[in-house]
Image: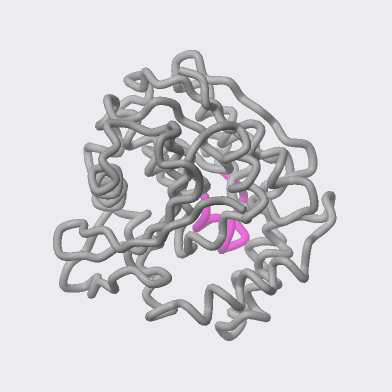
Amino acid sequence: MMETAERFVESGALRLWTERIGDPGDPAVLLIMGAGAQAVGWPDVLLGRLVGRGVQVIRFDHRDTGLSSVVDFDERPYAIADLAGDCLAILDAYGLASAHVVGASMGGMIAQWLGVHAAARVRSLTIVGSSPMGHDPGPAWGRAWAGEPADPDDLPPPTAEFVAHVAADLPPGVESDVELFRVFNGAVRPFDEAGVRAMLERAWKRAVAPSAAGNHSRAGLTFAPDRLASLSAITAPTTVVHGDQDPVFPLAHGEALAAAIPGARLAVVPGMGHVFESPGLPEEIADLVRLNT
């Protein structure tokens, strides 16, 4: 059985729920989930596979998710830099000078921010299903939502199926989220519906304020000079992992990201969508995590 320990970490006035899995003496991997997602979104089998590679793993609930502090966004708005600051607070609390950093979706943008602005804390980067942190998807997404033609200068917008699903505005809850994950998964790889439902039921039960997770979308659309910094400044060994069926950030986003980071490897995962909720896929992703420096 893997060694696990939960603790709350302070980031300024906030308390962040964290969990360490594995031997505290091993090199650390910090897992950063995407917008609105809790730590439990990282599959246990992925954690076990990583620990089996000789590392300890730390996962955590972002502010406004799970068991972590809830923020009044209107009174105290925050951005990607603040979410990255939470990651640094976690490393500090665990006494870690640096870690291998793995970020998914918005978590991948936070990972990029750390690679640019906190390079000494990042041993390696693995960015999964994400997009360049300085790219503003708003115009392209707006055209997609309005049914207007795409601008050839834009990175591609989400797929029509994803846009239609979001436009359906289903009531919040486990069943609606299962259907969202079905769209995230795509039609090529089998969808682990039972596993997804169990994870989502756990997430809904442990969420202090489920609606607060929507603040991440507002944070993700907040642009400042720190996000516009060149990704060419990243010196950490980097692997960009991207599914060729991603309905949110189509493959061109991963290709652009890998091209912008010096020496980055691009690992295209056939049949993968925006999540890793298909049998065998968590193990594949774990094996692609960059652990060499």
Q: Nearer the viewer, residue 125 or 40?
A: 40
Q: Compared with residue 151, is residue 141 higher up or lower down, i.e. above or below?
A: below
The residue positioned 62% from the left and 55% from the top of the image is 44
Where in the figure is residue 240, as x and y percent of width and height?
56, 30
243 relative to 80 in the view: left or right: right
Where the C terminus falls, by quadrant?
top left
Relative to the observer, which residue lies in front, 167 or 147?
167
Which quadrant of the structure image shows residue 27?
Answer: top left
Answer whether residue 126 is visible to the viewer in this image.
yes
Who's the residue at 62% across and 46% down the image? Answer: 48
Q: Residue drawn at (52%, 38%), measured in percent from left and top? A: 154
**Camera sees residue 138:** no
Q: Where is residue 67 in the image (x, y as percent from the top left)?
A: 38, 72
Residue 160 drawn in magenta: no
* Residue in front for this viewpoint, 43 or 161: 43
Q: Is residue 276 above or below residue 53?
A: below
Q: In x, y percent, where is residue 164? A: 67, 68
Classify residue 109 by image quadrant.
top left
Magenta residue span: 138-150
Q: Position of residue 258 (x, y in %)?
A: 53, 25
Q: Which residue lies furthest to the top in this view?
A: 263
What's the magenta bit mostly, secondary-structure-wise? Answer: helix
**Residue 98 higher or lower than 82, as above or below:** above
